[in-house]
Amino acid sequence: MPDSDDAAAAPPAAAAQSLSPDDWRLAVWRSFLRTHNHLLRQLEHQLQEHGKIAIAGYDVLVQLAEATDNRLRMSELAEAVLLSRSGLTRLVDRLQKDGLVLRQPDPEDARGMFTVLTGKGRDTLRDASKVHLAGVSELVLGRLSEPELRQLEALMVKLDPVPVRSGR
């Protein structure tokens, strides 16, 4: 049975046909936002249910794990995650307190700081990834065919300034 958020994600086909082109375009945009929000809430819930790190912390650890030398300047990290700079600072403070990241001064810029993934952070990410990736598979990848995923990839390439690493 579809979740109530699924039903609210898009207007019924008949209703969509009666919308003006501008209203339809805005309805598509709102559907995208609702779907994004729904998926993040579901993924967050799954992580919490299994006692894993919150999704925002998971995102920070992923960004650091994928970065050269597992470190990023705070400004780079802020651009990569879905948090305000002040929200990121508070989150990194908590992650550092938990031993998942550490801060290192930038030897080339006394004003700059790097956030660095620790071994404990890598282990935490690896552990949480099992739950997170299963959720991504269940909620998205398992619901779309390969042609639909290729179409989604093409759409994301048009919208996202960071290129998708294609599996082709």
Image: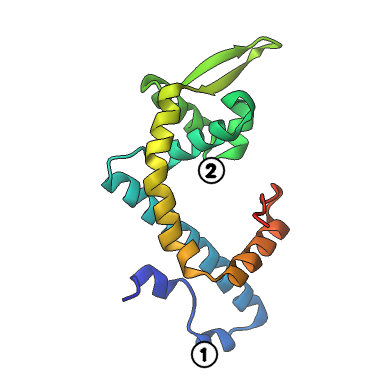
Q: In the drawing, what numbered circle is on residue 91?
A: none
Work out whether mark 2 precedes mark 1 in sequence or the reverse, and give the earlier one.
1
Task: Classify 17 as above or below 9.
Answer: below
Q: What crowding class fits label 1: few (fewer than 14 Cα within 10 Å), some (14-19), or many (20 or more)?
A: few
Q: Report x, y in % for residue 99.
A: 39, 20
Residue carrying label 1: 14
Instruction: Give the secondary structure at mark 1.
Output: helix
Instruction: Give the secondary structure at mark 2.
Output: loop
The furthest residue to the front: 168
Identify residue type, mark 2: Leu
Q: Is residue 156 visible?
A: yes
In the rendered structure, the answer to whether residue 132 lies left or right of residue 103 reads: left
Q: Nearer the viewer, residue 75 or 116?
A: 116
Give the residue displayed 62% in from the left and 37% down from the top. Answer: 79
Q: Report x, y in % for residue 76.
A: 64, 31
Instruction: Write down the quadrant of residue 53 in the picture.
Output: top left
Q: Nearer the viewer, residue 133 or 72?
A: 133
Give the residue displayed 36% in from the left and 23% down from the top. Answer: 98
Task: Classify 78 as above or below 146.
Answer: above
Q: Report x, y in % for residue 140.
A: 48, 62
